[in-house]
Image (cartoon, helix red, strand yellow):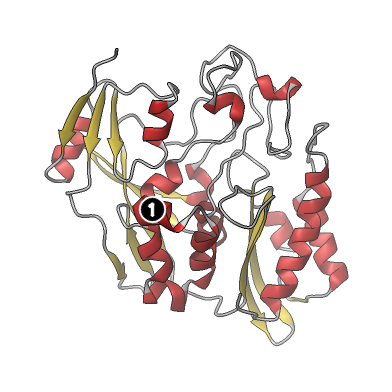
Amino acid sequence: MQSIFYDRANDLAHALQLGAQPGARYVAGGTNLIDLMKGDVEHPVRLVDINRIGLDQIAGLPDGGLRIGALARNSDMAWHPLVRQRYPLLSQALLAGASPQLRNMATAGGNLLQRTRCPYFTDTAFEHCNKRAPGSGCGALQGYQRMHAVLGVSGACIAVHPSDMAVALAALDAVVVAALAGGERRIAMADFHRLPGDTPQFDTTLERGEMITAIDLPPPRFGQHVHYLKLRDRASYAFALVSVAVALEMDGATVRAGQVALGGVAHKPWRVAAAEALLAGQPLNNERSRQFAARVMEGAHGYPDNQFKIQLAQRAIVRALDTAARGERT
């Protein structure tokens, strides 16, 4: 039996000091890490409990944006007045994820750091998983791929990132604030998660011991023209086959600017800036939405069990764009 040391951090500096030790992992809600430990997938030597160091506040920023502390619970974020009024896309995405019980425990930082639900990763009965055991191969490539990626894949991994929150944050141009003993840095959401490449064991660009302290949102600019669409096998507590986060700036029927991110299709939230440029300054109609969707999905590669995702994603994009343009609240 492996021994595990448990430390409770008193403040941020103490947490970073403890987190710098070999084999240390930060734990807050524990909704993903503890499950993976039980399944013999994760093997931390030291757990650093950061629940008592603050970082759970949600407050406005001087520029009109919003700062969400890394330890804010998902349920608190989803129902916070500032989030619901200024960033309804984020609220929609949070309420589409997990169950109320899990949302009451899961934190903003932990949500970003959750690992894939690929069964070849989470079940150690499967020997081949480059994410769990680098160099062992990818069992999904020759296995069952219904839930797997069709964009940004590599020969080493075709897993998807499971977060709903991260997809909305990507569409909203959020910034992740992270700290090390040497100071703080800001990471754009587009640069936070990694594609698998040859090193799928690394999910993010965080350094060892680095800790998320906050998520910053820019001043709101999309009003009610947002929509989070999640397509899944069952309506409650299921991960997305495809999800779409749409945020539109509208001038009457014309799109002034549009930002769209996809989930369930890649190792990270998927955005295509060149496709978004097709929307700017144009009236939104079915034909333009279809052109946009086709551009977003360029280069997609399906497998026997998930080929359907390519068409499903395009149809989901068209539907989500239409709903957001009409300003419907769901």
Which residue is at the front of the view, 298 or 86? 86
Query: Element under label 1?
Result: helix
Residue at x 53% of width, y 28% of height: 122
- Residue 313 appears in view: yes
Position of the N terminus by quadrant:
top left
The outermost residue toward the right is 287
Q: Residue furthest left?
A: 10
Q: Residue at x 70, y 77 (%)?
A: 325
- Mark 1 residue crowding within 10 angstroms, few (<14) / some (14–19) / many (20+): many
101 is higher (above) or lower (below) than 254? above
Q: Quadrant of the C terminus?
A: bottom right
* Mark 1 residue type: Ala
According to the picture, the residue beneath numbered tag 1 turns out to be 108
Q: Please, which residue is most extreme toward the bottom here?
A: 252
- Residue 281 position by quadrant: bottom right
Q: Residue 257 falls in which quadrant of the image?
A: bottom right
Q: Nearer the viewer, residue 32 or 25?
A: 32
Relative placement, left or right, of 218 versus 120 is left
**Vertical relation: 302 (above or below) 261:** above
Task: Say whether residue 295 is visible.
Answer: no
Residue 5 image position (x, y, % from top left) = 19, 24
Picture residue at 43% right of the left edge, 21% below the top: 40
Relative placement, left or right, of 307 versus 177 is right
Q: Residue 319 location, x and y as percent? A: 76, 67
